[in-house]
Amino acid sequence: MIQAVKNDQFSAEYAYLYFDIANSGIISQWLHAFDKQGINGLLPKPKACPSMKPQYPKMLPPKNRRRTLALSHFRTENEMLFYRAV
């Protein structure tokens, strides 16, 4: 889209309509960033301040716990099948 505007294939106003972008001001910002820093100017910038909300890691059951639960399930299932057969 930047190349199309740079090569005079589209005006900024027509480009935002053609590419279904929220407003033409965004295209102007992208063009300015591209002129200033090249393709790196279009990459997302890191946030200035980290989030104040604490990040808790997701607690997944350990692999051994999953295996133990699966084996317990199979044992119970086998016992039920055994008592049905008897």
Image (cartoon, grey):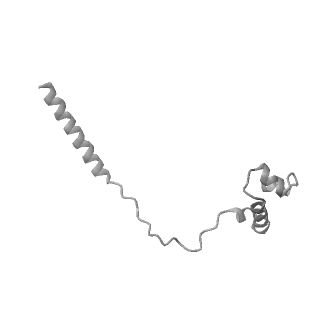
Place of residue 56 in the rendered image (x, y in percent of width and height, measured from the top left): 41, 65
Residue at far left of view: 86
Residue at far right of view: 8
Who is closer to the viewer here, 15 or 36?
15
Residue at far bottom of view: 49
Give the residue drawn at x 24%, y 42%: 71
**Which quarter of the figure has residue 3?**
bottom right
The C terminus appears in which quarter of the rendering? top left
**Which quarter of the figure has residue 85?**
top left
Place of residue 47 in the rendered image (x, y in percent of width and height, measured from the top left): 59, 70
The image shows a total of numbered marks equal to 0
Give the residue drawn at x 78%, y 69%: 36
Who is closer to the viewer here, 47 or 64?
47
Q: Is residue 38 above or below residue 18?
A: below
**Left or right of residue 30: residue 75:** left
Place of residue 18 in the rendered image (x, y in percent of width and height, measured from the top left): 79, 49
Place of residue 74 in the rendered image (x, y in percent of width and height, measured from the top left): 23, 38
Q: Is residue 32 above or below residue 64?
A: below
Give the residue drawn at x 64%, y 67%: 45
Give the residue drawn at x 85%, y 53%: 10
Who is closer to the viewer here, 20 or 78?
20
